Amino acid sequence: MNEYLKHDEWCIIEEGFNPENHQSSESIFSLGNGNMGQRAMFEEAYSGKTLQGTYIAGVYYPDKTRVGWWKNGYPEYFAKVLNAPNWIGIDVKINGEMLDLAKCKLSEFVRTLNMKEGVLKRSFIATMSNGNQVKVEGKRFLSIVTSEVGVIRYSVTALNFDGKISFNSYIDADVKNEDSNYDEKFWDVLNAKSITGEAYITARTKKLDFHVCMGMKYDLYKDDKKQTVVPSLIEEEKYVSNTVVVDICQGEEVVIYKYASVLSSLNHSKTEIMNDAEKVVSEAHQKGYDSLLNEHVAAWADKWANSDITIEGDVAAQQAIRFNIFQLNQTYTGEDERLNIGPKGFTGEKYGGSTYWDTEAYCVPFYLSTSRPEVTRNLLVYRHKQLQKAIENAEKLGFNSGAALYPMVTMNGEECHNEWEITFEEIHRNGAIAFAIYNYIRHTDDKAYLAEYGLDVLVGISRFWSQRVTYSTAKKKYVMLGVTGPNEYENNVNNNWYTNTIACWCMSYTQEAFKYVKESNPVRYEEIMKNLNFDFDQETSRWNDILENMHFPMDEETGVFMQQDGFMDKEQLTASDLDPQFRPINQFWSWDRILRSCFIKQADVLQGIYLFEENYDMETIKKNYNFYEPRTLHESSLSPCIHSILASKIGDIDSAYEMYLRTSRLDLDDYNREAHEGLHITSMAGTWMSIVEGFGGMRVVNGQLSLKPLIPEKWKSYSFKVRFRGNLVNVRVSEEGVGVINEEGEDISIFIVDDEYVIEKSSSLVIEHA
Amino acid sequence: MNEYLKHDEWCIIEEGFNPENHQSSESIFSLGNGNMGQRAMFEEAYSGKTLQGTYIAGVYYPDKTRVGWWKNGYPEYFAKVLNAPNWIGIDVKINGEMLDLAKCKLSEFVRTLNMKEGVLKRSFIATMSNGNQVKVEGKRFLSIVTSEVGVIRYSVTALNFDGKISFNSYIDADVKNEDSNYDEKFWDVLNAKSITGEAYITARTKKLDFHVCMGMKYDLYKDDKKQTVVPSLIEEEKYVSNTVVVDICQGEEVVIYKYASVLSSLNHSKTEIMNDAEKVVSEAHQKGYDSLLNEHVAAWADKWANSDITIEGDVAAQQAIRFNIFQLNQTYTGEDERLNIGPKGFTGEKYGGSTYWDTEAYCVPFYLSTSRPEVTRNLLVYRHKQLQKAIENAEKLGFNSGAALYPMVTMNGEECHNEWEITFEEIHRNGAIAFAIYNYIRHTDDKAYLAEYGLDVLVGISRFWSQRVTYSTAKKKYVMLGVTGPNEYENNVNNNWYTNTIACWCMSYTQEAFKYVKESNPVRYEEIMKNLNFDFDQETSRWNDILENMHFPMDEETGVFMQQDGFMDKEQLTASDLDPQFRPINQFWSWDRILRSCFIKQADVLQGIYLFEENYDMETIKKNYNFYEPRTLHESSLSPCIHSILASKIGDIDSAYEMYLRTSRLDLDDYNREAHEGLHITSMAGTWMSIVEGFGGMRVVNGQLSLKPLIPEKWKSYSFKVRFRGNLVNVRVSEEGVGVINEEGEDISIFIVDDEYVIEKSSSLVIEHA
């Protein structure tokens, strides 16, 4: 834990500068607009510890694999989020002395992330070693209206001197990934240009030939009067800049406005990219800082109107949930089906890759409720487009006939992970991808998606499962050997209940999907059958045989679903038996000890019960929750939210609240001292889920919205909005009762605690003491 | 397979030079004398592919660990066999042109390893690009009498020219390990000296501060007349040499004798090491080539007198078994208890480390029968001295109170392996170390070893097992979760039958050992109890509870011992179901596929049956052999020998012979195309076992030697010698019967096929059609 940030409903605020916290703050105050993002490093020079990070969506690097012990089937590379040329840099000299927060005397330092407006601010007073004192204010944002544009307003006021101030505004392409496997730099510079008032760099990745171009323009003002200063130019191989020097008198303020364009070859032709960058930055420059800011703030207001959650009576919780929502909205906007949601978003480099099962299991529910359907649809189409790669991936592992195994970690559909127990065995991810299709259709009613894109993905996945099981003549059942479930504190186990469950569900749902497509779109149905070379009777008869004869481990005595075969052979302890000073256990225990213990890293059986809740009665849910929760250490950021939702489900609001706190302020309070590496972006969606699905009890039941709200004791009220099919529903839960407003769409029929209510178009409903 | 070597009873012969085979030949023709070794690289320059390797026993380097995914508990380094300065180099120039076998025209190339004499020879005729033709003969050996001395005789005859020949005889310390994790060089040179007629280099390892000094002297002869030539000297930072030039006329032969001393700080003070190297090389030089060679050959004759195996009627088999025995004797002489037997000996760098469970499981039986007891005893003492490290290793993994886990791979007692499924889980190695103590005492009758060194090792190991098991309330049995058995094609399994079996045996044998020490040496007994803080009743009552209630997986239907829990859930296939072109499977299958298959890499249950044969009736042995052999792929070099022994045991001589062939010519015929990396030294002991224990049926039964000989159809006869307690017994098996000579020691009583015979001192026995 490291609680150094002020609690505030709309802002993240750091008062006073502690270099020890700077790298965490660089993560926490990160900016992003779906198309690009950056850590909150300083514009001016900083010689202290910093992780400078500028990232562009979809631009990555295949870094050659480095493992200790190679296993056949490992991928040749690990695709990494790529640190891109830095365009925010402005070196500031005060009477010739470089401003560097690691070297001057600082006071009144405040860093603020205004989440309502999407703006990062910073102000401080610096006393240089020459005695000159300046007040500095910086503001920057990455436009969510024009997503290739970033803008900085940087002002310096001379407090106690007359003299000269210089600004060296630059773009630097000599950057490196912190986690480069072989200490390589990943960029070559193709073109660097510095002319009066502007500068450009085009760089390309040494592999895969991604091109990016960064451009900049700037204006200089003194006390609101525009200054025309002839700059001196630097144009080096990987570095371009303009330096301007202005006279300043005590009390005067000099402001530099820096406009940047950030373009990539995902969206521009390689030959035109520098021209395009000139155009984009010129347009931004012409529009000017205030207009750009205003339209940006207005767009954020729109985003918040759909996705905000309010909490009364608990500022820390209010700040936290907004922080989670804000970061998710910064990371992914759903406009580009080639993109996905990396576990660290644009806030750091760890984990590389962009796509994990996190997307389907955690992020999809968030975007389904807070965005228009297209946003989630694009996440599904992303996987659809990678189906062929998933089939090839399965072939590498010995499967055939169109069986598809989606990768554990990927950028472009190819596996890039390289730990056998995860890469080859944590195959439940395939189920999450199928479930997301079901979830999307259940939520949006876009059944046509099946015929268009969904069915072939479902077939590939079901074929994989049907080949992956083995018929055990000993058990006279189908078994699934050698898997790693969601609980990564078990490896290479047999019959992980969750994996067996979701595998069977996939084979069952795929048949439903077939039925629907056959009835609704027989022409397309025939086309799909032909394309997939699908022998319906033969393939589904095997699936159904598996469905009827699958082995599900269960403890006869307690009636609890067993996480895997042999789970009850373990010594049965609970988390309370552990000495907290030896937690998290993966930092203290050798791996074998973790594996043979009964301790669970993250929801596993309970993840399955969460997904398929409707199949289990309350007693079964309680029994399993009460068995597994005490054994679960929540040493994955993805765990507490699921337990929180189930705790709400069984009415244990105190546990639900406790688990909610763990997930919501994970990064803000830096629970695990790892915020400096970047934020836990995907688990933030879980935080949202633990309010809406947990406390709010939101479900889709037989195609209708259903709520079973509870409220934590500490809160006066909370509210959230859910986009469901054609409606936008605003739910407010307070100590007094539940209010629901049908904000958009036609009349809607909703279940609230088992009773059905019709809320007319643009009307509301209040139920006291629901 | 790559069969390019000539069959010969005593020599390994390569006729004609094929650069493609050179690296394999460098391994196969390796020389060693227990104290040092080297690959069979050329003395003269060679610009083709070569793995130059010079190794000194006990001198290693802790290379910083490089893994993809760090697990808590991994060691910081991997100890590597260290490539040491090269002292064999002699650059040869013919009229100014460098002799380089990759660049000249070659004929009559023959490379011969004379195993009877321990001498490597080479001869060829080279035609230089200037047309000069020379005949070259090289001979070298590493003295097994003076183990710090190596000698080369290198002669050049001018066949078609008069002119000048120069020899640049050097020592080069600018060497590198091929498998350096971070591409580092591991040596610093402390002192380099080149004076007339001699040169020296002292180098030290960058870590651990091992020092080595190499010295050289030489003599030059022309047509048997000693030449006095003033050399030109080179003395660089890491390189010293003398170059001499002599005139030569057509038909004349010039010979250089190079004497080298190779010293390490294991045996010399660091301050004196160069002086000592001067002394050692001067003494060798003084003694002269012929004397050194004669005493070396005589010493090899002694070694062969004790350890030779003859085979009549099968030259390939004869050559192969001698090659295996020769390499074992080159690698380890048993004179230094600080040393052990690396899996590649002095023939390559792969696998690093020096000590695996191979030593106890495979090499100990070989040395027990072929050497005096002290040799094996030193191998046991090696582990005894590392007991404290084994206790610390167990502590790192969460064990306590003196529990000891010996490392998977080690140099100095510290673990250096870094794969969790092996390092932390392949714990059966602990059992092999205990079994070797038992085996040593059974064979030598040196029961006093228990009180001196054995008991504390046994207690540490038994304590480990008693902590490593878990009581399963579900099974009401003790279980051992999360292990990897000898069959490394299974990872992290529960209740590996072999591991459970040997664990129980350890706890049982340790109690026997206690009893013996208590009775025979009560004072020492009390001392040990106190030193180990051993509460006899408390600790052994837990052990006995485990012994009585251990779970051993078994297939009820067939009565076969199950390799682990759930083995019968696998798809039951046999090796014959596999397409040979996709073998070995670890080069074609992803790891998960291997793990969930029923295919076995090496003897596992059968390893247990081999060790504890007396506990199982013939029917049980047959049943298990017939179940496991068809599922075993023998993709470890350690596997076929055990199966061969059991095949002999059950009377299946054809299978036994087939498996014998796989193991004996593994490197000579390069079955797996990996001989270039070095030889499979430790599995060579298994080859020996498959003759003596397999065909010969040699066992120790109730303290007496027992034989049940069989003979492969192809053989006329075979003979071997067994040193057993005070006797040296010579056994000859032929189609006609068995002959046994009691060569050394008092009268001995031997079982031959269940009948007991007494053979008097220096007498023999012949049994026809035994």
Image (cartoon, coloured by chain):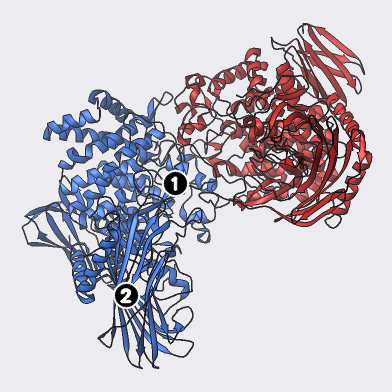
Chain colours: A red, B blue
Say what secondary structure mark 2 lies in.
Answer: loop
In the picture of the structure, the residue carrying the numbered disc 2 is: B196
* Mark 2: amino acid: Thr
Q: Residues within 10 Å of mark 2 (few under 14, many from 20)?
A: some
- The residue indicated by pointer 1 is B77
Which residue is found at the position 84% from the left and 18% from the top?
A730
Residue B725: image x %, image y %? 14, 51
User: Which callout, 1 or 2, points at the residue further toward the start of the chain?
Assistant: 1
Q: Quadrant of residue A360?
A: top right
Check the picture and name the quadrant holding the N terminus of chain A.
top right
Query: What chain does badge 1 belong to?
Result: B
Instruction: Using the numbered discs, state the Cα–Cα distance from disc 1 to disc 2 in whole angstroms.
Output: 42 Å
Q: Could you tell me which residue is drawn at 84 percent across and 34 percent down?
A: A249
For residue A564, above or below residue A88 = above
**Is residue A32 at all visible to an observer of this figure?**
yes
Question: Which quadrant of the view contains residue A496?
Answer: top right
